[in-house]
Image (cartoon, rainbow, N blue to C red):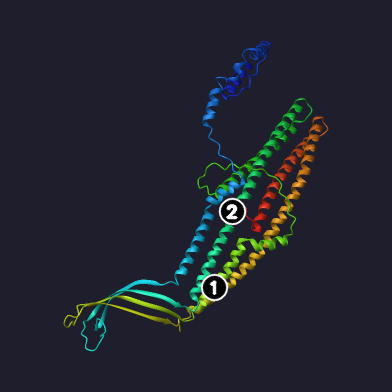
Amino acid sequence: MARRRSQQEHGQNSAAGTRRLPRKHGAADLLGLLAGLLWLATGGGALAQMPTPAVAPLLDAATTAQAPAAASLDLPALIERALAHNPELAAAGFDAAAAAARTRGADAAGRPRITLEGGLTHYGDDQRLFGARYNGELGAFGADFLVAEFVLRVPLYTSGRLVAEMRAAELLQASGSQRLTRSRSELAYNVSSLFYAQLAQEKLIAALAQADDALQAQLQRVRSLVREGKAATVDALRTEVRLADLRQRKLRERNSLVVLQRALLNLVGERDAGAPLALRGTLTAPAADAREPGALAERALQQRADVAAARTELQAQQARLDAARATYGPSLNLLAAAGSRAVFAPSQQPGNTARQDGTWRVGVTFEVPLSDGGRVSARVDEEAARLDAQRERLDRLTLQVRLDIETAHAGLSSALERIASAEAARGLARENLHIEQEKYTLGRGTAFDVLDAQSAVTDIEALHIRALADARTAAAQLAWALGEDLS
């Protein structure tokens, strides 16, 4: 039975492509092994450089099946990729282009307009084709007329309506550009936040893997002590339970990492559910910011693009209100037309009078609104209400800026303090674990003490990693709240 078990182990090790030697017993086997090693050291060492026939095919297959690794991305490269492919940012760019098109439309409203106009008209009584140009002039009469002419209209005076509409359009175009700038900054901050979160998650999973290895080593020591009669079997069971709990935690953290990776792929505009992005970077503590939150808030109000956009939109809304009020005033237009008029089936056509003739006219028209059922006043009230709403939104944004600054500043200070505390506790936790392990080996401690010490090391390491990620994120958040360029 022992020989059969040894053969099975040898077959499993060969199939797995490992180099572990099968376990053999006996003096003859040991002498044969020593002789083989001596031969390799003296004359057959060249063969040691070649893989064995059982391993070489596995190495070739692994090399062939391995896909080329994707290049890792640091934070600047990742932000650049997101700025180039993020759908929401692209939509903001199209919104800015739409605002520019509206500005061109408002500008065109004040320019001359040429149209081709005409129609077929039937009169109840016969009409003359053209009015008589002198007494006794003959002309064709009929009831059906076809008219076609080119008409030129030029607005001369609109009580300031066109000027106000043009100003509103220009201000909204400027606001669109400012909103686009803010969207770029917000995207850069979101990418930075996910970047540091993913780095922290990967580092946390690596720390949990190290804790797993440490617990497995502890379990082996406990089992050895149990075999020697120096520990109870329940200590091994407790260690196995703690190991299972640690592995469950590691699984949860891996699931969280998958969610972070998917979120990052969405931000950079990856539409295909491909492999996660490989990130390159380190988690280091940022520098503290000694500036006062009040001074930072005043600076943010001066340089943040969304605040500038809100102020621009307030001015644009005032211009729209002016345009609505200008509708009450008169308007003056230049009108010129040139075309042709023809009569069908004339009832009278004396002599050789023509059935068709050309004509032109030029003049100035004016329009004064007297009563429109309250439509103009309703529009004025609407624009006035929007102006008040825009003022309130600007006030709310001012308060939000101060909140953003204070939140980011407090978050950065808190994270830096947590980093310092965790760094001081890491060494103490490891030293405590070493002491508890020695005490347990000597029979002076309990398994509970060792497991608690090991959990403390893992928890402190996790807190340190989280604090580093929170500090980097808070630093990026403070720069975003200030309106600084993160790209």
Q: Is residue 164 visible?
A: yes
Q: Quadrant of residue 146?
A: bottom left
Q: Is residue 232 left or right of residue 78?
A: right
Q: Nearer the viewer, residue 471 or 429?
A: 471
Position above or below: 24 against 311: above
Point out residue 312 in the picture as x, y percentages from the top left corner: 58, 67
Q: Secondary structure at mark 1?
A: helix
Q: Residues within 10 Å of mark 1 (few under 14, many from 20)?
A: many
Q: Quadrant of residue 404?
A: bottom right
Point out residue 220 in the picture as x, y percentages from the top left corner: 72, 29
**Residue that mark 1 sits on:** 319
Q: Residue at x 18, y 81 (%)?
A: 349
Residue type at mark 1?
Ala
**Residue that mark 2 sits on:** 187
Position above or below: 397 against 190: below
Q: Secondary structure at mark 2?
A: helix
Q: Is residue 354 left or right of residue 108?
A: left
Point out residue 129 in the picture as x, y percentages from the top left corner: 24, 81
Q: Nearer the viewer, residue 71 or 61?
A: 71
Q: Residue at x 52, y 61 (%)?
A: 96
CB within 8 Å, label 2 to label 1: no
Residue type at mark 2?
Leu
Q: Is residue 147 left or right of residue 216?
A: left
